[in-house]
């Protein structure tokens, strides 16, 4: 049962990544068909982001009441319905309408699954699961490409991904009893205290056993604001690099567009591959070292991008190095949450972390675009460097806060 549920969670993480690249891959054609400006893609992604932020903040209350299994199944079903709605939309306002349930479903399932895995599975699985998200995000552009080149249109790509999500919803609904049974036995090699679930604040299905942890109460826990800033900074680095790396290489470094596009895509592949590799030593190294090493490696990559050399090799390799550095940071921050702030508080705090992540992802790239318009694309590596330094600084301060002798008593007071 343990292995079967883990396989389902892996598949769910692939499904989380599948829709994430569809808008970007299909927008050049979609905006022509819908007769809207190119800039309207920002409106659509903002609507989705607002939905994810709202549902992430509400995830603790919802998951505590219904359990992680039910929330996952319903949320995937919500995104499936939204994607099917996208496929039948003939106007931009309809896309915006369907973007609301898509955002709400994506945020809820992201927070619920991340907390469930952080509570019940080892660090290696958290890294591999987020690697599988990258697999999904890498597959969807090929689905869109096939739909466009075969003459079926962008709507068929959304229809295909929507039907995949419908099938997954059915599987998740059928598997709901597993969520209530699988963690009552200790899985081989697990470090989870499955015989004391009542102390974790959640039963085996992921449903909360204690009282509701409000947003205001969670933020008051020492160190929470630090981890939120660190998480926002990391996600800002990731989203800014994904959006602007190719433009920087072409406009500022004079790299050929084809070469720039290939190496910009390697940043995402570096994240995906890096998380897969990190899974093999995550349990031995520990979350703190993964976060510290990740920020330092990402910083090294940024320095390589910024070096004013006659050759562009350092900038191209720097993107790959930055991607590898970014790889373990997101999973390690999530996985360390129950340890740093208490298992009973983890769902609320992970929900807030997801909201901070989506905030950084939504605001950082357009902010860089505005700044680059005023100053020039040379700002790109320095912008990333500030964000990397901020993330490293906040994570190191967090380590000192949660390492204080009285921190355990403070967390226990908030859990009581």
Image (tube, rainbow, N blue to C red):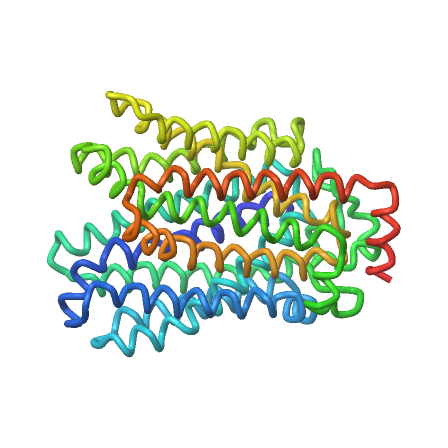
Instruction: Judge left or right: residue 77 versus residue 380.
Output: right
In percent of width and height, residue 353 lies at 59, 56
Decide which of 370, 260 is in the foreground and name it: 370
Is residue 8 at all visible to an observer of this figure?
A: no
Q: Can you name the residue that lies furthest to the front here?
A: 375
Residue at coordinates 87% horizontally, 58% vertically from top-left? Answer: 413
Instruction: Judge left or right: residue 387 versus residue 39.
Output: right
Decide which of 344, 341 is in the foreground and name it: 341
Residue at coordinates 40% horizontally, 33% vertically from top-left? Answer: 270
Instruction: Judge left or right: residue 8 versus residue 268.
Output: right
* Quadrant (top left, top right, bottom left, bottom right) of the C terminus: bottom right
Decide which of 222, 308 is in the foreground and name it: 308
Decide which of 213, 176 is in the foreground and name it: 213
Q: Tell me how many marks there are.
A: 0
Residue at coordinates 28% horizontally, 33% vertically from top-left? Answer: 263
In percent of width and height, residue 236 lies at 46, 49
Is residue 145 at all visible to an observer of this figure?
A: yes
In percent of width and height, residue 133 lies at 45, 47
Residue at coordinates 44% horizontally, 55% vertically from top-left? Answer: 361
Instruction: Judge left or right: residue 342 versus residue 72.
Output: right
Q: Is residue 148 above or below residue 108?
A: above
In percent of width and height, residue 285 lies at 65, 27
Q: In this view, does 45 lie above or below 273?
A: below
């Amino acid at each position: 049962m343990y292995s079967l549920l883990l396989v389902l969670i892996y598949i769910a993480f692939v499904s989380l990544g599948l829709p994430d690249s569809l808008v970007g891959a299909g927008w050049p054609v979609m905006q022509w068909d819908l007769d809207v400006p190119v800039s309207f893609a920002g409106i659509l992604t903002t609507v989705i982001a607002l939905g994810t932020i709202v549902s992430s903040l509400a995830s603790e209350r919802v998951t505590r009441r219904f359990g992680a299994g039910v929330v996952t199944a319903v949320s995937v079903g919500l995104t499936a319905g939204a994607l099917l709605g996208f496929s039948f939309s003939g106007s931009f306002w309809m896309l915006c309408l369907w973007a609301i349930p898509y955002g709400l479903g994506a945020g809820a399932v992201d927070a619920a699954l991340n907390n469930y895995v952080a509570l019940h599975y080892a660090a290696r699985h958290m890294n591999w699961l987020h690697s599988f998200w990258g697999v999904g995000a890498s597959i969807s552009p090929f689905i869109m490409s096939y739909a466009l080149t075969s003459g079926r249109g962008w709507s068929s790509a959304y229809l295909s991904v929507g039907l995949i999500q419908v099938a997954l919803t059915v599987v998740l609904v059928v598997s709901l009893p597993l969520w209530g049974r699988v963690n009552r036995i200790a899985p081989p090699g697990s470090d989870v205290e499955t015989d004391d679930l009542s102390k974790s604040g959640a039963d085996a299905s992921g449903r909360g056993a204690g009282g509701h942890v409000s947003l205001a109460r969670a933020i008051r826990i020492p160190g929470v604001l630090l981890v939120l800033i660190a998480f926002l900074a990391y996600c800002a680095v990731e989203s800014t690099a994904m959006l602007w790396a190719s433009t920087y290489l072409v406009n500022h470094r004079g790299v050929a567009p084809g070469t720039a596009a290939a190496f910009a895509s390697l940043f995402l592949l570096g994240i995906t591959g890096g998380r897969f590799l990190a899974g093999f030593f995550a349990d031995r190294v520990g979350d703190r070292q993964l976060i510290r090493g990740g920020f330092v490696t990402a910083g090294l990559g940024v320095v390589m991008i910024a070096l004013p050399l006659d050759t562009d090799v350092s900038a191209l390799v720097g993107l790959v190095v930055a991607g590898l550095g970014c790889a373990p940071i997101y999973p390690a921050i999530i996985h360390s949450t129950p340890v740093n702030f208490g298992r009973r508080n983890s769902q609320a705090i992970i929900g807030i972390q997801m909201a901070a992540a989506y905030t950084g992802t939504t605001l950082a790239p357009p902010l860089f675009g505005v700044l680059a318009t005023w100053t020039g694309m040379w700002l790109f590596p320095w912008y990333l460097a500030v964000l990397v330094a901020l993330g490293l600084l906040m994570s190191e301060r967090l380590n000192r806060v949660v390492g204080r002798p009285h921190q355990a008593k403070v967390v226990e007071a908030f859990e009581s």
